[in-house]
Each structure stands twice: as C-alpha cells, then as structure tokens.
Amino acid sequence: MTAAGLEPKVYIVGAGPGDPELITVKGSRILRSADVVLYADSLVSGELIASVRPEAEVLQSSGMDLEQQVEIMTAAVKAGKSVARIHTGDPSMYGAILEQMSLLKLCGVSYEIVPGVSSVFASAAALGAELTVPELTQTVILTRAEGRTPVPEREQLRQLAAHHCTVALFLSASLAEHAAAEFLAAGWSPDTPIAVVKRATWPDQQILRTTVARLAADLREAGITMHAMILAGWALDPALTDRDQHRSKLYDKTFTHGCREGIEADG
C-alpha cells in the first residue's frame, strides 16, 4: 500500500461527462489519494483535478503519445507509487484503454478499471429522455459514424440503423451529413427525431433538437463540430411526455412479478 492507502498500480478511472459531481465515490477517492495523476486535460474538469493531493504529480496526457504515457505509469508503479489515469466519461467507451492495458501487461504492471458515467447517459438525462420506451424501442445501439477511423464492414451505420431502434452516435458531429444519409438509406423517416447534446453536464452545455433531414444543416448553423452526443430515434420525441401511451409492465397493477401479485383488470 502507498502512504495514501492505494495499491501501487494503475487505476484507469472514468471521470464522468463533465460535472465534477458525477464521478463515482470510488473514482473520487482514488483521484484524491493517487501519487501520480495522468489525465485527459482537454476533456476532464479542472475542478476534479484540483482535488488531488498537494504532493501528487499531475500530468496532462494531450501532448503525449501512448508509449510516453505507459512509460510514465510503469516507472511510477515500479517505484511503489499509485497512478490515477483519468479518462472522460466511462473508459470502456472509445477510451483507447485496451492499448494501454496491453503495454502495461507487457511491462508487468497491474491495473484496475473504475467505471464512470458515460456521456450517452448524461445526454439522455439532460434531455429528460428514456432511451428504451416500452412498445416503441427496447434496444440502444452505441456506435460512431465512419470517418478517418474506419468501422468494420458489418457495422456500417446503415446496417445498424436498419433495426430502427435508438442509436447513440459518439464522435460523429463532424460527420453529420454522412450519418443522416445512412439513416435515410436504412429506411428512416426524414422527420425522425434527433437530439444533440454538446458538452453534456458542463456549464456551457448546448442542446439541439432536430430531425434526420435537418441534422447536418442544423449542426452547421449551431457551429457544433465536436464534443457532442447524437441520439436518434423516436424515443427522442419530446412530445412523448405529453402522451400517456407507453407504460411498462413493471408497475402495471395487472402484471404479476416476483415482488407483487397482479390484480385482474376491471370489467
């Protein structure tokens, strides 16, 4: 154990989407206790980083390549120190952590992943949306549009969109025209609702509601090109809360489950 009570290893911590209160209790404890903090400085709240120990070594990762980051983390752990590698959102979603883990393993360095609140769920909360609406959609596809980084052929957006469920697009604001074309090619109606949340939970959070047909034009007009989550599908229809049409079975008084006996419907 280190002086602050952490094991000398690398903790890959999800910091949440932006709001410093949305880091987990465990993630916050590790951040405040670590000997070395390496963080994605362009994406992680400065308020969070301000909570580190005064004697901790704090390093920004934006100017480093993979090998430099791993070299720093490896040296620290082998010197008996704990390392908090802080990622935005949840590190399992487009966090580029596999490559870090592979090199750390080759170096004989232990690591642990601490999950965080993903921007997809922070965006849904900001919109007041349920992504899995009974009798409308029960599936959410988390993906990204193809750009400079390719996606496997079987995961092209039009093939995924053919399921006509809720689709969450990471890292795709600059590819809106392509994304919209893929939705239309998959048979989506041009007026299918889309909601875009830029910098979810940050003080300058921006929400844009649009449709498949208007997506690219409205993003251009709003000047949104990055740091945005695109949520598409009829679950994003803001009028859903005006209609009591999509109830779950969970709280249906006629539905029996393990915690409650249902009652017969009237007449």
Image (tube, rainbow, N blue to C red):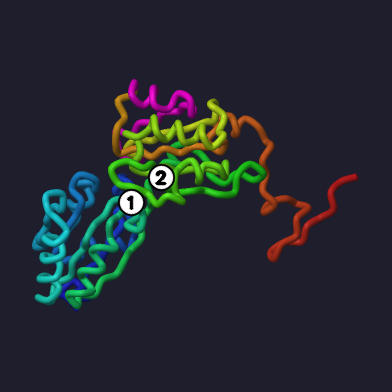
- Amino acid at pointer 2: Ala
Disc number for residue 122: 2
Q: Are marks 1 and 2 in contact (CB under 8 Å)?
A: yes
User: Which quarter of the figure is the N terminus placed in?
Assistant: bottom left
Q: Is residue 159 left or right of residue 252?
A: left
Q: Is residue 12 magenta?
A: no
Q: Please rate how many residues cluster around mark 2, counting C-alpha atoms within 10 Å: few if below 14, some from 14 to 19, many from 20.
A: many
Q: Residue at x 34, y 60 (%)?
A: 25
Task: Say which element carries label 1.
Answer: loop
User: Which quarter of the figure is the C terminus placed in?
Assistant: top right
* Span highlighted in magenta in the image: 200-221
Q: Is residue 35 left or right of residue 137?
A: left
Q: Residue at x 38, y 39 (%)?
A: 229
- Amino acid at pointer 1: Gly
Q: Is residue 9 left or right of residue 122?
A: left
Residue 93: quarter of image: bottom left
